[in-house]
């Protein structure tokens, strides 16, 4: 079964700082998703990465994908309090792409 | 375009009862997937339906079942509820094997 590991699971950072969340997956996959979840809310799609070397940026968040290393990163630049949330990476494969395998999530807290 | 809708949003049931949750996908989306989210197990895949057929199934007991109607709306049913079934149940819709868009979820509490 496809395994997805995220680290760190908990991240507490000061406003203005930079940090990276890592997402490793165990077998070949051709797409990687990043989602954000606020407490008590559903999942909001942030990025869809479809090919090796893909890089996408939205505001202070930038996601990248290295399919050879089976690694995706979510980089946070100059964090602000509004980024506090739980971030999930997820992937799928082949004929079971209707099924996503999720990491455990990274709970990010940004403090002043 | 309206998003994914789920009803009810909150539900409290007693052990042994059964429950039915409903999901209406984004218009034009024919794939509906269901996930269970708990603090202990995280997000776990239940099943996926496409054109009224179950296409993928996760590792859940037979008490968990689902179906999809011709208008792509989907329901999931849990029979003989257990305390451990308390969770946030999320459904997601997508075009054929595309990006999944999640609904607001149904918070089920089993007492």
Image (cartoon, helix red, strand yellow):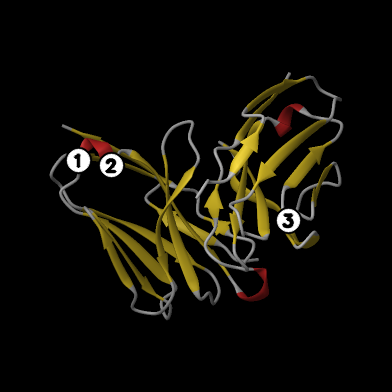
Gap in angstroms between the C-alphas marked 1 and 2:
6 Å
State the count of labels. Answer: 3
Secondary structure of the residue carrying numbered label 3:
loop
Secondary structure of the residue carrying numbered label 2:
helix
- On whether disc 3 and disc 2 are found on a single subunit, the reply is no
Residue at 72% from the left image edge and 48% from the top image edge: B73
Residue position marked by numbered label 2 in the rendering: A83
Gap in angstroms between the C-alphas marked 1 and 3:
37 Å
Q: Residues within 10 Å of mark 2 (few under 14, many from 20)?
A: some
- Quadrant in which the C terminus of chain A is drawn: top left
Residue position marked by numbered label 3 in the rendering: B58
**Left or right of A36, for residue B58:** right
Q: Residues within 10 Å of mark 3 (few under 14, many from 20)?
A: few
Q: Chain of mark 1?
A: A
| Residue A39, image quadrant | top left
Q: Chain of mark 2?
A: A
Residue position marked by numbered label 1 in the rendering: A80
Q: Chain of mark 3?
A: B
At which x and y percent is residue B74?
74, 48
Gap in angstroms between the C-alphas marked 3 and 2:
32 Å
Mark 1 in CB contact with mark 2 (< 8 angstroms): yes
| Residue A102, image quadrant | bottom right
**Which numbered marker is on residue A7?**
none
- On whether disc 1 and disc 2 are found on a single subunit, the reply is yes
**Left or right of A108, for residue B60:** right
């Amino acid at each position: 079964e496809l395994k997805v590991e995220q680290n760190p699971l908990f991240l507490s950072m000061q406003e203005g700082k930079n940090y990276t969340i890592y997402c490793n997956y165990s077998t070949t996959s051709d797409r990687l998703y990043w989602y954000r979840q606020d407490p008590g809310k559903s999942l909001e799609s942030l990025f869809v990465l479809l090919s090796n070397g893909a890089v996408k940026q939205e505001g202070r968040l930038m996601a990248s994908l290295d399919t050879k290393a089976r690694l995706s990163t979510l980089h946070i630049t100059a964090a602000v309090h509004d980024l506090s949330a739980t971030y999930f990476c997820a992937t799928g494969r082949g004929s079971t792409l209707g099924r996503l395998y999720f990491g455990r999530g990274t709970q990010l807290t940004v403090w002043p | 375009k309206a998003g994914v809708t789920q009803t009810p949003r909150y539900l409290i049931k007693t052990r042994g009862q059964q429950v039915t949750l409903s999901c209406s996908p984004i218009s034009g989306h024919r794939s509906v997937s269901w996930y269970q989210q708990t603090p202990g197990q995280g997000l776990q895949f239940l099943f996926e339906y496409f054109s009224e057929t179950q296409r993928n199934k996760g590792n859940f007991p037979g008490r968990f079942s689902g179906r999809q109607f011709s208008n792509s709306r989907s329901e999931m049913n849990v029979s003989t509820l257990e305390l451990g079934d308390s969770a946030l149940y999320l459904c997601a819709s997508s075009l054929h094997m595309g990006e999944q868009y999640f609904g607001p979820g149904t918070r089920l509490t089993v007492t």
